[in-house]
Image (cartoon, rainbow, N blue to C red):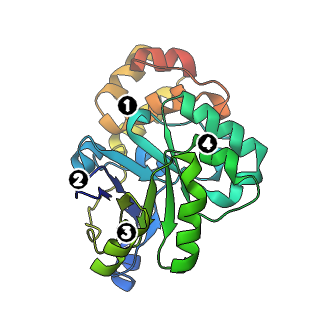
Amino acid sequence: IITRTGRIIGFQLVQRSMTEHAATHAGDGDTVSVSTLLGDMSVSVDALVGDTQLFCQPGPWLLTGTAPASTLARRTVLEVPAELAGNAEVLDRCRMMLREGYALALIDFDWYPGIEALLELSDAVEVDLVTTPRERAIDLVERCRPYDVPLLATRCRTEDDLTWAGHVGFELFHGPAVGRPVQVNGATLAPSALSQIQLATELLDEQLDFSRIEGIINQDPALVVQVLRQASLGAGGGLRREVRSVREALVVMGS
């Protein structure tokens, strides 16, 4: 995602399986959810985008408050569908996410009832130049002017798209004319079979020894990640707290 001068301000992260990539390798793919990006993937976010912004969809479970937000808030732009403008619960959740340090961008933008409230919270408005006729795009640009929110022209496919979008008032640009998606392979970080067997053996022992359990977990990075993450979420996501060590995680989780 670039500015008028060509400066890169962020990247929109997309995710597709290998079969999807083979079938639609010229397509745009699906936007990756923030929980998938920061929860299960072993790909380094820093290696992908450096210190620029991440644009990604949070998923409905995050917008309704049924899942906790991730870290990296200071540089994550959550893409909120504009059609949710009339949903008071989503609006309250967006305000909370802003307080936590996230930025918001409206996607699939059109002038839905109640959109004014979301515009006042948003740091960007994304208008899809493929699905939005140019006359309608110009109208949306004019209606957004009083809110002083940057307009992002997405799916710019040609140089003409970029020139036209800049002329009518867009400030940010994204799409094949800016840069094609780069495929980065990643895999889920999984514990070794030996570690799982050792851990299961200890947990089934009537004389539970948390020191031995801690030792098993500390030898397997994937187990460390899983235990710390589960402890920070709490049982059923009910208790959310910062956990700094495996020992602390074990105290929180119990047997």
Q: Which is closer to the viewer, label 2 or label 3?
A: 3
Q: Give the quarter of the image for residue 20.
A: bottom left
Provide the residue designation for mark 3. Answer: 167
Q: Secondary structure at mark 2?
A: loop
Q: Amino acid at mark 4?
A: Glu
- Position of residue 245 relative to residue 185, above or below, is above
| Residue at the disc numbered 2 | 7
3D distance between C-alphas at marks 1 and 3: 52 Å
Q: Say few, some or many: other residues with alpha carbon within 10 Å of mark 3 (under 14 / 14 to 19 / 20 or more).
A: few
Tell me which label, 4 or 2, sits earlier in the chain: 2
Q: Amino acid at mark 1?
A: Val
- Mark 2 neighbour class, 10 Å CA radius: few under 14, some 14 to 19, many 20 or more: few
Residue for point 37% across, 58% down: 172
Quick one: label 4 or label 3, which is nearer the N terminus? Answer: 4
Q: What SS does tag 1 mark?
A: helix
Image point 40% across, 17% down: which residue? 244
Identify the disc placed on residue 224. 1
Compare residues 50 and 23 and report the one nearer the observer: 50
Q: Are marks 1 and 2 in contact (CB under 8 Å)?
A: no
Q: How many marks?
A: 4
Q: Position of residue 231 (x, y in %)?
A: 52, 26
Three-letter amino acid code of the residue under disc 3: His
C-alpha separation, residue under disc 4 versus residue under disc 2: 25 Å
Please tell me whether mark 3 sits on a helix, a strand or a loop: helix
Q: Which residue is mark 4?
A: 120
